Image: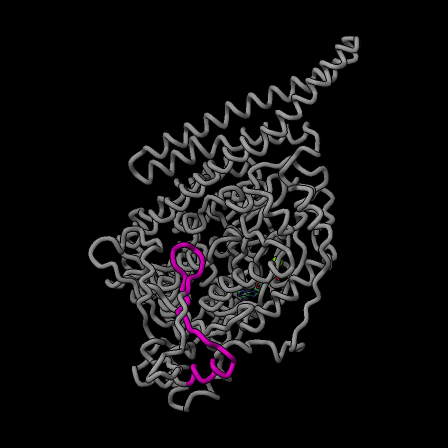
């Protein structure tokens, strides 16, 4: 089967992408119920009401909803759509949809119907989706409710088109069963808190949005080869595989020219993405062979998260057409780089000011420093929760491995800003401002205007300031960004409200406004400066240093997840109204279960592959060598001349024994873990006793792959998976 798969893979031709549209202008958002479509298909009042709901969260009345439904239906039918669905993001981390047809039989005829009610709210049941116990208790019903801030879109499959309406998914009692509901809450809280703080600097600001640009890394593997690897099919990563002699050590793949088959694939999914209004702009080869990246232009955060979820679906589907399988797993291959999803985040006012962009006058500098330092403090205070929000079985393989940010949450800000903050804390007076009275009172160092160009890069930091935004680099490539972004927004909203209270308290004591702001920022910096780290995050020295500073280093998912239910989290999230204690507990359990099940599946596959794919060729080969030895002996060969064969036979035998012993031991550990009675204990046991065995087992299997006759080996090898394209 391996050679058949290889034949398949090697005979593939690049598939040229034909598109009826060939200009971006025509393609972009052609499948989105965007502003243009809204203006065409809705009357003026309906349009205005929908716009205001999208931008300011105002309520939409039933009548308006009905009008929107009429317009949306007309638009959809004109595009050949037959079904509609509420599109949501359950706690599986993927997207969910249940299609209903516009068609209804009436008096023996077919009519097409779509009511305001169907647009606004549905009860898809969906009771098999994870709820962490929220739906078992008294009311099992689950509802989806329209999110007008993310426009409806048309998803095309080969033989049908579906109108998708982005929705939140909540229980009968209003508890969130998805990722979008809490994200939306965090967005509106952050808006309010940031707008309040903005009033210190800019009177005309009345809205602040979080912006997000998501860089998405992924691997491509030939579909035929992929299907010959049970570990890739079941777990998304290889659990075995002897390293290819040449992988990324020559650095010749990074930013290299893109192979034709891959290029066509990229163009194809980019076209599909553009139609859905996903503003993809960047594509390139990544560091590891077979690894690539794409990135859109940043967008409002809710939209950016929706678009990334949609993009992953698209990429998966389009890959099929090109004979590829796309891997979003954080660590599909041992020994080479894994994949992340860098979350570029900042805050932008309705007047167009990027609040994380350093200004060129003292006042805008003070505004910048305010938001900058508050971000540092927010990250510092909630770093454990941020760590929890990116924790998963798959991301554990990446965090802390020497190519991704470590599990220690720290912030990199670059040398220029380090100096600026030092001066701020130490009250180093800058030349007093000349202009207005206000500017004259600001006695902090001026930030060089060239800052934007001279920020240094540090790839080893989980949270890096990159000129006019922060980049959360620790998010895993397979993960929805909603969770970490909800946490970041919430932490920032909480922090900014605290800041406002602290500054106002000083102003009440007759401090001048700007002096009060500076004083509070100085205190925050003192409180949180231990989270700032400019050095090499991969080094052992940092692990020791971080421990000295009292920073957490939560290396596995079960220990990282505790932060979901810590007193701090329960209090802050409760106070903000983003999560109740029950909702946090539910999420904690869902994540633990997800971890446990993933490791459990990996354990099962390791067992199966070891017995059915590694041992058989090894035994076969051992037998061949033994027969060879026997026939040489019978023919009177000297001891010396059979020495090498004997050695190979022994070596193969040793690894066979070790492999079997260790697999059996792991299976026992798995069974013991399953018997524990709480999910916490199970997950921890899976981490401590099961997962921990995997590398050791793999070591022997990989040695066998290296020893055994290539023609007997059934699993596609690393060199084939990574280099055939
Ligand atoms: P890198 O050099 O870090 O790999 P990329 O070009 O791959 O950069 O991606 C950078 C991402 O950051 C893009 O999605 C870009 O739109 C986004 N970005 C730029 N400015 C902002 C901002 N102010 N807020 C959020 N994201 C931003
Ligand atoms: Mg990039």
Between 287 and 117, the one nearer to me in the picture: 117
Asked whether the viewer can see residue 183, the reply is yes
Q: Residue at x 74, y 44 (%)?
A: 250
Classify 595 as above or below 638: below
Please report the residue visible at 50 percent of the width from the left and 25 percent of the height from the top: 662
Q: Residue furthest left?
A: 138
Rendered view: 222 above or below 260? above
Is 265 one of the magenta-colored residues? no
Q: Nearer the viewer, residue 715 or 596?
A: 715
So how many labels did they put on this image?
0
Say whether residue 84 is magenta.
yes
Residue 498, image quadrant: bottom left
In percent of width and height, residue 161 lies at 50, 73
Q: Is residue 451 left or right of residue 57?
A: right
Dividing the image into four equal quarters, which quarter contains ligand 1?
A: bottom right
Magenta span of residues: 71-97
19, 366: nearer the viewer: 19
Q: Is residue 627 left or right of residue 451?
A: right
In the displayed orientation, state which residue is furthest to the bottom. 44
- Whole-percent x, y for residue 270 in the image: 61, 67
Residue found 51% across the figure and 33% down from its top? 694
Asked where in the image residue 317 lies, by quadrant, the reply is bottom right
> Which quadrant, please, contains the N terminus?
top right
Measuring from the top left, give residue 34's x and y in whole percent. Answer: 49, 79
**166 or 587, which is in the foreground?**
166
């Amino acid at each position: 089967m391996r050679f058949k798969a290889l034949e398949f893979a090697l005979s593939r031709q690049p598939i040229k992408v034909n598109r009826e549209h060939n200009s971006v202008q025509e393609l972009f958002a052609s499948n989105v119920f965007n502003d243009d479509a809204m203006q065409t298909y809705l009357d003026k009042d309906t349009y205005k009401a929908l716009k205001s709901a999208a931008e300011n969260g105002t309520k939409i009345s039933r009548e308006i909803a009905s009008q929107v439904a009429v317009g949306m239906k007309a638009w959809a039918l004109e595009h050949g759509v037959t079904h509609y669905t509420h599109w949501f993001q359950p706690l599986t981390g993927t997207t969910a949809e249940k299609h209903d047809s516009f068609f209804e039989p009436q008096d023996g005829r077919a009519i097409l119907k779509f009511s305001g009610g169907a647009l606004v709210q549905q009860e898809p049941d969906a009771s098999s989706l994870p709820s962490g116990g929220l739906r078992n208790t008294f009311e099992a019903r689950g509802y989806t409710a329209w999110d007008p801030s993310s426009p409806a879109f048309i998803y095309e499959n080969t033989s049908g088109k579906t109108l998708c309406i982005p929705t939140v998914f909540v229980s009968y009692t209003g508890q969130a069963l998805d990722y979008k509901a809490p994200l939306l809450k965090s967005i509106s809280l952050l808006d309010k808190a940031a707008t309040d703080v903005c009033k210190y600097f800019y009177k005309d600001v009345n809205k602040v949005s979080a912006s997000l640009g998501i860089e998405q890394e992924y691997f491509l593997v030939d579909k035929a080869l992929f299907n010959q690897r049970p570990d890739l099919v079941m777990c998304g990563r290889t659990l075995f595989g002897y390293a290819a002699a040449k992988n990324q050590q020559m650095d010749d793949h990074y930013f290299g020219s893109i192979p034709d088959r891959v290029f066509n694939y990229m163009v194809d999914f980019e076209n599909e993405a553009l139609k859905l209004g996903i503003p993809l702009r960047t594509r390139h080869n990544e560091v590891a062979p077979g690894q690539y990246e794409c990135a859109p232009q940043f967008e409002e955060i809710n939209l950016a998260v929706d678009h990334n979820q949609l993009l992953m679906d698209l990429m998966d589907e389009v890959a099929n057409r090109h004979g590829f399988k796309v891997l979003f797993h954080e660590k599909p291959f041992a020994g080479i780089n894994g994949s992340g999803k860098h979350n570029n985040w900042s805050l932008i006012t309705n007047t167009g000011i990027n609040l994380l962009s350093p200004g060129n006058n003292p006042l805008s500098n003070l505004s910048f420093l305010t938001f900058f330092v508050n971000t540092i403090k927010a990250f510092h205070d909630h770093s454990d929760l941020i760590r929890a929000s990116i924790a998963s079985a798959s991301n554990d393989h990446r965090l802390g491995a020497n190519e991704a940010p470590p599990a220690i949450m720290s912030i990199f800000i670059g040398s220029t800003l380090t100096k600026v903050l030092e001066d701020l804390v130490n009250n180093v007076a800058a030349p007093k401002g000349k202009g207005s009275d206000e500017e004259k009172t600001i006695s902090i160092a001026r930030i060089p205007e060239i800052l934007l160009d001279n920020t240094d890069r540090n790839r080893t930091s989980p949270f890096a300031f990159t000129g006019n935004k922060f980049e959360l680099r620790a998010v895993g490539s397979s993960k929805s960004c909603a969770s970490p972004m909800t946490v970041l927004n919430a932490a920032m909203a909480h922090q900014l409200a605290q800041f406002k209270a602290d500054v106002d308290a000083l102003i009440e004591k007759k401090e001048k406004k700007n002096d009060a702001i500076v004083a509070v920022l100085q205190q925050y910096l003192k409180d949180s400066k231990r989270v700032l780290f400019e050095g090499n995050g991969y080094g052992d020295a940092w692990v020791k240093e971080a421990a000295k500073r009292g920073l957490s280093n939560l290396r596995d998912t079960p220990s990282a997840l505790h932060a979901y239910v810590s007193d701090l989290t329960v209090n802050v999230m409760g106070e903000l109204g983003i999560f109740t204690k029950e909702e946090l507990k539910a999420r904690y359990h869902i994540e633990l279960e997800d971890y446990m099940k993933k490791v459990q599946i990996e354990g099962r596959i390791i067992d199966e592959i070891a017995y059915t794919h590694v041992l058989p060729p090894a035994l076969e080969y051992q037998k061949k060598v033994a027969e060879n030895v026997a026939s040489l002996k019978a023919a009177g060969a000297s001891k010396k001349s059979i020495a090498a064969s004997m050695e190979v036979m022994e070596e193969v035998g040793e690894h066979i024994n070790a492999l079997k012993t260790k697999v059996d031991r792991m299976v026992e550990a798995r069974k013991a873990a399953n018997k524990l009675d709480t999910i916490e204990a199970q997950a921890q046991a899976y981490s401590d006793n099961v997962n921990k065995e995997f590398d050791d087992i793999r070591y022997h299997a990989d040695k066998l792959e290296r020893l055994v006759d290539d023609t007997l080996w059934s699993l596609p090898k690393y060199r084939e998976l990574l280099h055939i394209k």
